[in-house]
Amino acid sequence: ARARDLFARLPLILDADAWVALPGGAGTLAEVALCWNVLQYDRPVGRPLVLVGDRWRHSFDALREHLVVVDPADHDLVGRVETPAEALGLVMEAMAQAKNSSTA
């Protein structure tokens, strides 16, 4: 869905079943940080956050190195892949795991 600004997008972002981030700008970085924070505190099963592309790998490595109040396990909450097809695979896998755990 298209929204006029970050504040209009927030409800859409928070209501999503999964988050996939392609390379972007400061707004994309803010959205990724928001989703990562949701995962850190709520740990919603089946709601993956996947970063697509080599640029995210470098950015996330810098965050891993410089953020001092982030638990190392929190870094594992974020999937990092090279292609949109790989991102789709991670999303489908996470959603299938969530479905299986809710029926068990």
Image (cartoon, helix red, strand yellow):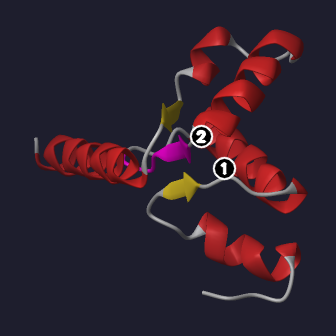
Q: Amino acid at mark 1?
A: Cys
Q: Is residue 67 above or below residue 97?
A: above
Mark 2 residue type: Leu
Q: Is residue 41 left or right of residue 99?
A: right
Spatial separation of the CA atoms under disc 1 and disc 2: 6 Å
Q: Secondary structure at mark 2?
A: helix
Q: Which residue is under mark 2?
A: 39
Say whether residue 11 is magenta. no
Please rate how many residues cluster around mark 1, counting C-alpha atoms within 10 Å: few if below 14, some from 14 to 19, many from 20: many
Quadrant in which the N terminus is drawn = bottom right
For disc 1, the marked residue is 35
Proximity of marks 1 and 2: CB atoms separated by less than 8 Å: yes
Residue at (33% x, 54% y) in the render: 88
Q: Is there any visible trace of residue 68 in the rendered image?
A: no
Q: Is residue 49 magenta?
A: yes
Which residue lies at the image location 72% right of the left edge and 26% below the top edge?
A: 58
